[in-house]
Image (spheres, rainbow, N blue to C red):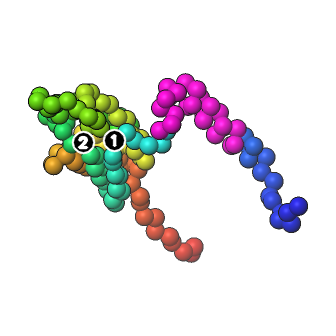
């Protein structure tokens, strides 16, 4: 038996129930069964860096037709759609194939909302770099403390 005293919080059980309900709905209806193995992992490699006023997202997309890529932001949801264009070898038979092929769609949830109209995208050597300015409401604001008179 533990000697530690725990403060009673009447809403603690409800918080846990809420999380369990979200997980139940997410696992039961949102993801097809085969994708549950990869829950929490993006199918495409990506890195998100937070700076003071922007998020910088780098996504590894070698071999895509970047001119026809469709990148959309709604609130804090970022969707990238495109097509891998990797030519197949014509004079031999493939022994294995690990290269992505065809169309893809990836949805990423950002930590906060961004200004979609000010976002920029650059594709260089297989890396798509998105600069996503934070929404003004989501930026950190300093609050000066005054002394009581």
Q: Is residue 29 rendered to the left or right of residue 79?
A: right
* Image quarter of residue 119: top left
- Is 22 magenta? The answer is yes
Numbered marks: total: 2
Q: Which residues are magenta?
A: 15-38
Q: Pick the quarter of the image with the N terminus.
A: bottom right
State which quadrant residue 117 falls in: top left
Where residue 127 appears, as percent x and y from the top left, is 22, 48
At x 40%, y 44%, the residue is 110
| Image coords of residue 27 (percent x, y) | 57, 31
Of pointers 1 and 2, the one earlier in the residue sequence: 1
Kindly identify the residue that appears in the image at 69 percent across and 42 percent down. Answer: 16
Q: Which residue is mark 2?
A: 61
Q: Residue at x 60, y 35 (%)?
A: 23
User: Is disc 1 in contact with disc 2, using a CB cutoff of under 8 Å?
Assistant: yes
Of the pair 140 and 43, the residue shown nearer to us? 43
Q: Which mark is residue 44?
A: 1
């Amino acid at each position: 038996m533990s000697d530690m005293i725990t403060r009673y919080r009447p809403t603690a059980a409800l918080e846990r129930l809420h999380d369990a309900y979200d997980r139940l709905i997410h696992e039961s209806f949102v993801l097809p069964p085969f994708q549950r193995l990869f829950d929490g992992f993006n199918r495409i490699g990506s890195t998100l860096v937070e700076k003071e006023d922007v998020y910088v997202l780098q996504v590894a997309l070698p071999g895509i037709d970047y001119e026809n890529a469709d990148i959309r932001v709604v609130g804090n949801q970022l969707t990238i759609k495109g097509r891998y264009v990797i030519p197949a070898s014509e004079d031999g038979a493939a022994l294995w194939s690990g290269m992505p092929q065809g169309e893809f769609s990836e949805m990423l949830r950002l930590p906060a909302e961004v200004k979609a109209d000010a976002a920029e995208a650059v594709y260089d050597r297989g890396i798509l770099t998105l600069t996503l300015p934070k929404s003004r409401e989501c930026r950190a604001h300093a609050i000066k403390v005054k002394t009581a008179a």
